[in-house]
Image: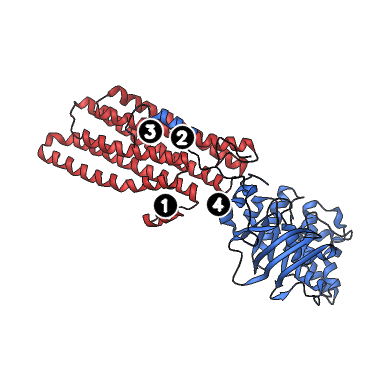
Chain colours: A blue, B red
Amino acid sequence: MNTMSPSISAEADTRSKGAAVPVPEDKPEDTVIEEGKTVGKPFTADPKFKLRNVDVSYGADRAIKNISLDIGRNEVIAFIGPSGCGKSTFLRCLNRMNDSIDICRVKGSLELDDQNIYDSKRDVVELRARVGMVFQKPNPFPKSIYDNVAYGPRIHGLANRKSELDDIVENSLRKAGLWNEAKDRLDAMATGMSGGQQQRLCIARAIAVSPEVILMDEPCSALDPIATARVEELIAEMSESYTIVIVTHSMQQAARVSNRTAYFHMGHLVEVNKTDTVFTSPQHPLTESYITGRFG
Amino acid sequence: MPNNKDQMYGDHISERFNNELLELKTRLLEMGGLVEAQLGNAVQALTANDSVLAEQVRTGDRGVDQMEIDIDEEAILIIARRQPAARDLRLVIAVIKMVVDLERVGDEAKKIAKLALKQEEEGQTSLGSVEVRHIGNHVHAMLHDSLDAFARLDAEQALRVMKEDKRVDEEYQAAARTLLTHMMEDARNISRCMSIMWVLRALERVGDHACNIAENVIFMVKGEDVRHTPMEETERVVGR
């Protein structure tokens, strides 16, 4: 305790230089992560996906190291982490997009509604109809807007008559917020649309087959801010009826659109928590360092 | 790369972001230093009947007000530019709130200085000076320690400041009783005693502001809001 004196402000000055800063830690990047250990709340009561001890390797490289996670029904979960942390690899396990890579091996238990995703008898086409995907770059087929959306329902035989197909196309475009812009030019080539419209068309195409889950791999990284805002609005609306898993490099986007956020680091799942918690008081020092721009 | 200047806020990829946060922290501490001096001088002016010093405090308040505006502007620009998260966000938000408390302490100091000037006109007496000096020292130390806790990010020290507030309240009650006795003894004391009551009230408020600052320090360090929380719960948060 000090006494009152005119030297007080001088004292405050030396204080601001901070002789006693907290004990220096090692660089956060060097933190050793215990395999399979995730802080926060990785599990939920009524999961859509139940993923346990998942290991993914490309040849000798382990890209995913013993990750366990639940993805809740109708929740929006964001996967974040520095490049090469395994978030996209993990996302692609959820509808077996990794199958096309010969050297890719997936181990562990991955269940969608209590059924094994990697069962050898499972129909992958049916799986991908239930678990749709939207990619980083909009990738419409070089066909008309109508045919892009109608493609999935056609191959899955979801419509018996032209009028039914018309309804599916209109509904999907409406849900994707594209109907007003596209209704008068359904026969126009999809590739002639703007980037943002193309991405929303891809979302319309994904939801045309009535999926239960939509996987989004950096869906806005090629879009301008207005188109990004539209897609984010769409995610919020779709979250009422779909489970959405989004990989994003934009921390603000994760903060805006998701209910829970999962932080990946070098193949480990470091932290899963409510998004509000992650962006105000993350539990793990690595999560904190990443979201505050200390490395990445 | 962690930077030697500050382990907590100096290790972003963006060096400019480091500098912005450190600058914000430094400027809050500068404002704190100024407000501490204002408070110390106000009490000194009152107890020593020093009207020159009192006048200096009265005009000095403009400097405090300007710092409030400048620091707020800096904080707003950081939010707009950087969209800070986690501990960085907590620092910026805590600073925005602490600035308000510091400015209020500045106002209390000005209030005391004005009473000192008024009392000088009315004639000198030392009635109540002991109480003013005693409580003044106490809340001044609380303010100093709360700012020190901010500088060091020391949640335990912040907790100690919060615990002091109860003692200040008790001292205030005791001083009020003493003054009441003086007023009952001699009606000519009433005017002087009422002034001293105002001063003590202002000082008691300074203690509250120091507590608010301490609460913000705990929020910054621990990530939990301990306002309107029982002391045992706050102790648990700090002990984690």
Q: Say what amino acid the circle numbered 3 marks.
A: Glu
Asked whether the residues under marks 3 and 2 belong to the same chain, the reply is yes
Query: Which mark is nearer the camera, 2 or 1?
Result: 2
Q: Earlier in the sequence, mark 3 or mark 2?
A: 2
SS at circle 2? helix
Whether tag 3 and tag 4 are in contact, CB under 8 A, the answer is no
Where is residue B63? Give x, y as percent: 43, 28
Where is residue B204? Give x, y as percent: 30, 42
Q: Say what amino acid the circle numbered 4 marks.
A: Thr
Which residue appears at 40% of the width and 55% of the height?
A: B229
SS at circle 1? loop
Q: Can you tell which quarter of the image residue A46 is in?
A: bottom right
Q: Can you tell which quarter of the image residue A138 is in?
A: bottom right
Q: Say what amino acid the circle numbered 2 marks.
A: Leu
Determine which of the numbered discs, if any, sits on residue B227 in the image.
1
**What residue is pinned by disc 4?**
A280
Image position of A190 (left or right of B76): right
Residue B188 seen in render: yes
**What residue is pinned by disc 3?**
B36
Image position of B92 (left or right of B156): right
Whether tag 4 and tag 1 are in contact, CB under 8 A, the answer is no
**What residue is pinned by disc 2?**
B29
Q: Using the image, name the chain to which the residue with label 2 belongs.
A: B
Q: How many marks?
A: 4
Determine which of the numbered discs, if any, sits on residue B239 in the image.
none
Asked whether the residues under marks 4 and 1 belong to the same chain, the reply is no
Q: Using the image, name the chain to which the residue with label 3 belongs.
A: B
**In the displayed structure, would residue B63 be above or below residue A73?**
above
**Alpha carbons under labels 2 and 1: distance apart:** 22 Å
Q: Nearer the viewer, residue B41 or A58?
A: A58
SS at circle 4? helix
**Alpha carbons under labels 3 and 2: distance apart:** 10 Å
